Image (cartoon, grey):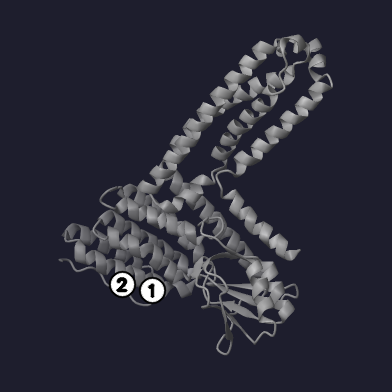
Amino acid sequence: MKRVLSRLKFLYHYIIGSIGFYPTLISLLFFGLAMCLIYLETRGLSKSVKENLPFFIITNGETARMVLSSITTGLISLVVFSFTMVMLVLNQASSNFSPRVIPGLITYKANQKILGLYLGTLIYTLVVMVNIRSDMYSEELPGLAIFLAMCFTILCIIFFVYFIHAISQTIQIDNILESIYEITRKSLLKEEEKVNISQGQRLTSADTTNWHPLLCPKTGYLQTIDHKQVAEICRHHNVLISFLQPMGSFLVEGTPFLMVNKPINDLDTFCEDMLDHANFYKAELVNTNYLYGFKQITESAIKALSPSINDPGTAVRAIDYLTDLLGIRMRLPDEEVLYDEEEKARVWVPKVNFDELCRNCLGPIRLYGKGDTVIVARLLFLLKTLLYKASKSPGRIKSIQQHTQQLLIDASEVITNKVERLNLNRLVTEMNKMNILDRELTLMPAEA
């Protein structure tokens, strides 16, 4: 049963990442509504409504067929046009920004629900249409169901106007970045909340010196594991395990991917149980792993700095978002510990440490933007902000100092204007005056 629940959890994350999730769900609801109304029509629903609201009910079969046929034709055109617009948006986002942002765009619930309304109304109309009788049975027409089809069509037209507006907003890079930033921030705060709950427990690292490696049974990206069930598997086998790579890493079959504190007698069963509660898939969803949010924002900034795009304003906005996200990540530990039901540490899951995360995010931006004084100044502001917040996380100061010095070295090789170098040195001097660094940062030479 636990295996089934884990599979269902992973299947749920996969399904909600599909563009057809809400359209399928809403279409099924409309199909059920149509069947219920047709059944109630056989019980005389339209007759009772006709007595009180006769202008709502169509009594002519030919008119009913013409109305439903027009609705069907129009909705098919609307659905085709809407899906075409979605595909164009995804293609443009992939070309101008980064292919990594596509999963996030697909999971926009508002657009999915609107497409679901179109498909649901179309299915509802088709079900009602096949129940239209000839003129001699016009008194038995499903009049109320036909009237609701007209109402749903009007609703589709209203939401089509909103859909055009939403699509035009979706393709704007500012909105894409903000959406990624908000989801990543929520994911980080959720991680921080989990850490705060576990403060009473010792978050110590495991000494894996004499532990035994376990080979990966499958090739792919290990995105997530069912934390509770994996800890219980370790309790059942009375072992401790430590993953060698963080979640989201690419694992190759037959290579070590975790360490076990002692040999396991029933190794095949243990590996099979672990595989049942581990999820391998390719989609990079931010709500699954916050690292993907950092990656998508960074790649958008790099693309904005490329000569083909040449949009430093977008890069500055991306750096601003990274400033806040890195500030939150600074407060989190570099390793996650999972506990069993007896509150005993069983599983150690490493995370991409803060220094490596800064290198992955700031390194490419520094490389492509080192000749732009606006970008360099914004990166210095980012590092200065992190340095201020590092007063509560002294272990991060060394990393911030190293990245700042690397930025100054790269910028010094490219920026030759004396005034610009003086302005950048002024920002570095402000960082030195904060009296947080172990040693002062080296200023850029006055002349190149």
Give the number of the disc on residue 341.
none
Question: Could you tell me if the residues under marks 1 and 2 are in contact, i.e. CB atoms within 8 Å?
Answer: yes
Residue 384 appears in the figure: no
Locate residue 2: give its quadrant: bottom right
* Quadrant of the rendering where the C terminus is positioned: bottom left
Seen at 52% across and 28% down, the residue is: 78
Residue nearest the observer in this picture, 216 or 176: 216
Find numbered disc 1 in the image and state the secondary structure of the residue it sits on.
loop
Q: CA distance from mark 1 to mark 2?
A: 8 Å
413 relative position to 37: left or right: left
73 relative position to 307: left or right: right
Give the number of the disc on residue 437.
1
Find numbered disc 2 in the image and state the secondary structure of the residue it sits on.
loop
Crowdedness near tag 2: few (<14), some (14–19) or many (≥20) residues, C-alpha within 10 Å: some
Q: Which residue is mark 2?
A: 441
Amino acid type, residue under disc 1 in the picture: Leu
Residue 332 location, x and y as percent? 54, 67
Residue 143 location, x and y as percent? 73, 17
Residue 56 location, x and y as percent? 71, 13
Seen at 66% across and 11% down, the residue is: 62
Residue 268 location, x and y as percent? 66, 78
106 relative position to 299: left or right: right
Q: Looking at this view, name the residue that lies furthest to the right.
A: 43
Residue nearest the observer in this picture, 323 or 172: 172
Amino acid type, residue under disc 2 in the picture: Leu
Locate residue 397: give its quadrant: bottom left
Compared with 125, 102 (above or below) is below
The number of callouts visible is: 2
